[in-house]
Structure formats: structure tokens, C-alpha cells
Amino acid sequence: MNRIEQLFQNKDSRLLSVYFTAGYPSAGDTIPIIEALDEAGADIIEIGIPFSDPVADGPTIQESNQAALDQGMTLKKLLSELKDIRQKTQVPLILMGYLNPIIQYGIEKFCQEISAIGIDGIIVPDLPMSQFMEEYKATFDAYDLANIFLISPQTSAERIRLIDENSRGFIYMVSSASITGAKSGISEEQISYFKRVNEMGLKNPRLIGFGISDKATFDTACQYSKGAIIGSAFINVLTKAKGGDLKAAIQTYIQSVIA
Amino acid sequence: MKTLIAVDEKGFYGNFGGAYIPEMLHPNIEELRDNYERIVAEPDFQAQFKSLLKDYVGRPTPLFYAQRLSEKYGAKIYLKREDLCHTGAHKVNNTIGQIILAKKLGKKRIIAETGAGQHGVATATVCALMGMDCTVYMGKHDMERQRPNVERMRILGAKVVPATSGSQTLKDATNEAMRQWINNPVDTHYIIGSVVGPHPYPEMVARFQSVISEEIKAQLLEKEGRENPDLVIACVGGGSNAAGAFYHYYNTPEVRLIAVEAAGLGVFSGKSAATTALGKPGILHGSKTLLMQTEDGQVTEPYSISAGLDYPGIGPVHAHLFETGRGEFVGVEDEDAMLAGIEVSRLEGIIPAIETAHAFAALNQVKYKSDDVIVINLSGRGDKDLDTYIKWGNY
């Protein structure tokens, strides 16, 4: 059992997972942001591996990806920065990134190294389940890494069951048909989708992401799942705090969401 | 006959292809994959497709014997006149096919990406024809470079939306179109303009373009008493005109397939779009293919004097043609392409698109025998490139 699975055993509700892009807002901010998020009360931290062509992401995350790349962030550099992270925090850590940089790094080498670092899971938005099962599952399993899949309101019940069957950790429930940061607020239609999925009796817990930005949306999401994921809204907080007191800004924001 | 080149049921041509898409796009792609072969096979679809290609696009396009060019190069050179298609290039063959498909799938609106604007214009054209709402995503940088095509699309009633991320060119326009498809999964069809993207796009677009080689076969039989030329030459950006010109010859090994890439200022100059020379296997826009990228797996920005060839990848079928050796890949530099464009203008009275000029320049770079029959796919006309010809100025 890895830290993600452990977390869901220990905490049953109002889990907060926070995404940020490695190497953003400034090149050296990755480790300080992880520490600040841990202290502020984030339950899971998703570290984004920047990519030149993030097709599932809206402008906020795109821009943070491009800025991180311009500031010299690479997957190799990120893994070397993360090397001693487990001496600093035991919070579950997920790497989130598009497939191409991971393939170029080498899947086996990637899995082996992130497992040695103490990373608990991976989200690869452009790796579809069928391809994962065929090419990568054995490697991920060998290194005890949870692969986290997404579902959206358009995902069929049959496919949700298949994803549930092949998931570890949790299922990332995309709140609406959208890219990240595209919509705000939660509609009645979205709530009926959350309820529909809840009634399926899935074995994996769900976290709701996309469109979660503040206490109100977090609270709503938590009524229908174990918790929620914040991405673009947190990137906006980092952008505003660039060059100032990041730690204080993170503390204030996270507290405002989970209070 | 041994089948060398074919797509398998998962959308792979050998090691390349597939559908590497975010889960949010899965229902869209599944709907297309599950329905397109059936719909395309229906007599009603075929009748409508053929009728529009004939009466609207102006097909069959002529296969023209280029006498003066033949004399100069010492071979029998035929030109497949895709430049005479409505809108000025082969692109419309595909948009006609996809718009009929979109209607039959019950879609209400169309989105598309465009680089130089040719595919955008071809999409805006068929949307006007069919009364469909049309939005075209175009890199902000390309919008500035290709003003007349932006206005053509607007005149045709399309909305042109700038893609402002990354390098603000074709790859970013494609990213933006995919994002908008994620945001509008139910009522929208995405018309991809080349043999790229997730399965089934590469094969579907190639099939709609395969009318080119279907006609070449019949026309060559009439003119030369044989269906098969010795060489077919076509330029490759993403590779849709080449896929169409090669399609019915994929599995006829005696026909040499010459794919011409843009080498820009020189293959290793750092200013090039010669993907097979510079690329490594990677994943972009939903398929595994050869891709120009950094060691870290970031996609790099290609360069060519021709806006239609500066794509950092190549259709998966072309990556497979390259890997298996079935296709011969040639890189043509800017200057040689421009000289070839002027030469065709002077010898045959046809100003080719600069993309197409690359294919002509390959005549200086590939070997052939004096009695060889060569078909060059004249994929587009040069009207849209007058500014570039004028700026280059060496004529």
C-alpha cells in the first residue's frame, strides 16, 4: 500500500489535492512550494512536469508550463531536485505530465527513479487506458506506482467501470466537459453527474477536479466525493505572489479553501 | 500481393499512429471511429461525395503532360493538377468528405486548425456550402503572415480565432482546436486538415485524399497504357497530399514513392522542417510519429519558407513509409524550392504553391532513368504565395 492508498484509509472526507507546475513561478520554487503546501494542509500534491503542448490545459496552466520551460525546467532537473524530498515531507506526491517527455526519458528509468524518490502516483492525461494496459501497466505495478485515470461527464458507465477496475489510488473525476481552468462554479447538471457516479459503487474513491477554485466550490465538491483538486486557481495565486512571500500566500490561500 | 502499408484496427501503421488522447476526448474519437467506416461506405455518402467532388470541386483534375519540363529533365513528367481544385489546393477533397460525415453524425458546428490558411479556407468553404457554423483556430503569428487567407475565411462566414500560446503557429492552432473539442464534445466535429491526429483521422483523411491516386491510375492508363508510373513525387508537411497521391500505390513496390520535406535553410541549420532527418519517435496531437523535439521531449518549432510545410511532425503513415524504406525521403532547401517554382512557372505557365515547388525541386535530387514516367502531385497553386515570391525577388 502506498501513501495515497494509506491517506484514503486515514482520512475519509474533505481531502485537498493541489496541482502546481514544477519550476514556476521561479526556477527554484519547486521544493519550497511542496513544503509550504504540506504545512498549509494540502493532503496530496501534484507536481506538473512542464510540456510544450499541453492539450488538456487551459491558458493558466499553459502559461505556467511555458514559463517553467523558458526558465530551464526539464524532467531530468525536476527529478534531481526531488531526490531528497522524502527527508522533508511524507505527503503523498503525484507527478502529472504528458506522455512525450516521459517516453523520451525512458518509461522504465522514469518509474524506477520516481519510485526510488518516493513518488506515489502518476497522472498522464494523454495516455489512454488501453495503451496503458498494453504497454505500461506492468512497469508501473512493478514500482508500486498508482496510475490515476480521469473520467468526465461524457464517460460511459461501462468505461467508468473499466477504469475503476484498472485504477489504483483514486479516480480523477473531471467536473465538466472542459480543459483545466475553463469554467467556474458547479451546476445542477454537474451535481447529477457526481451523484450518478456515486451510485455506481466503485471500488476507488473519487476526487473532483477542474473548476474548483475556492471554499464554495471545494465544499460543494466534497459533498459528492472524498475531496477535490485545485490547479489553475492555485497557479494564479503563485503568479500573484511571484517574487514576494510565496509561503505566506500559499498558507493564506489553502486555509481559505479548507477552513 | 503482399500488403506493405496498411493501418491496423488500433490505428497503427507499424510502430506509428494510435490514439493518445485525453480521456475527455475518448467519447468523441470513439464515436468517429465506430461510425466513419460505416457511413463512408453507405451509397448515399458515396453519391454525395462523388457528386460534390465533380460539380463543386471540379474533379477529376487533369493529369497534364509537362512537355517542356520533361525535355529539360529527360523523363516523362506528368502533373496531377490539384491546383485546379476549387479553393486552389487538394485540401478541399478532405473537407468535403468530413463535412458530409459531420452532417450524418448530426453535428451542428465545425472547428478546424490551420497553418497557412489553406485548410482553414477549405473548411470555411464547405461550411458555407452546407450551412454549418465554422470556427477556425490559427496561430496568431500565422494570422499576421497570412492576412489574405484570414479575410477569405471571414468572407466565407467563418470565425477565425487566434491561438496565442507557444510559438503561435500550426501546432499551437492544433492544440487549441483539440482543447475546444474537449470543451464542446457533443455538438461539434473537428475537421483535421492533414493525415495527423489520433486514429481514425490519419486513415480517414488519407482515404478522402486517395481520390488523387485513384484518378492518376485511370488517367495514366489512358495516356500511357499503364496504371503505374515509375515515380510519384509529392511534398510532405503533415502529408495529406502525399498520402492521397501515394495511397493506391502503397502496395505496388515497383512505383517509387518520393516524399519531399522542407529542409529550410539546410537540414542541420537549426532552421528546417525535415522531420524524418531530424525527428525521433514521439507523441504529439494524439499519435505516435516522428517528431522534432528536444532531448527533454519538448516539441521544437520547425522552419520553412513555406508555411504549409512547417509542422514539427509527420503523418504516422509517412513515418512508417520512412522506417520501412517504402518511401524515399528527400529534403529540399528554401532557395532550391523557390528556383523550382520559378522554373515551373516559366516552362509550363503554372505558378505552383511554394509547398508544391519543393516537390519539383526534388527532380534535381533523385535519380531516375530517361524513359521513366514521373507523376508530380501539383498540390496547390501559387496565388497565396505571391508575397513570398515577391519578397524573395530572384526572378
Image (cartoon, coloured by chain):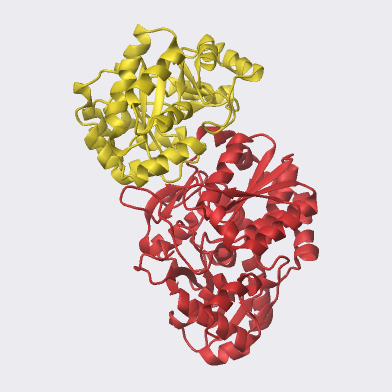
Question: In x, y percent, where is residue B176?
Answer: 56, 45
Q: Do we see residue B353 in this rendering? A: no
Residue B232 or residue B261, whichever sits in front: B261
Question: In x, y percent, where is residue B321?
Answer: 45, 62
**Residue at image point 46% right, 68% down:** B261
Residue B267 or residue B362, whichever sits in front: B267
Q: Do we see residue A128 in this rendering? A: yes
**Residue at image point 40% right, 62% down:** B276
Q: Quadrant of residue B118?
A: bottom right
Question: In x, y percent, where is residue A62?
Answer: 46, 40
Residue B213 or residue A169, whichever sits in front: A169
- The outermost residue toward the front is A244
**Residue at image point 71% right, 68% down:** B85
Question: In x, y percent, where is residue A138?
Answer: 32, 31
Q: For this view, does B96 lie left or right of residue B197?
A: right
Q: Which chain is yellow?
A: A
Please say if B332 is above or below B8. below
Q: Which chain is red?
A: B
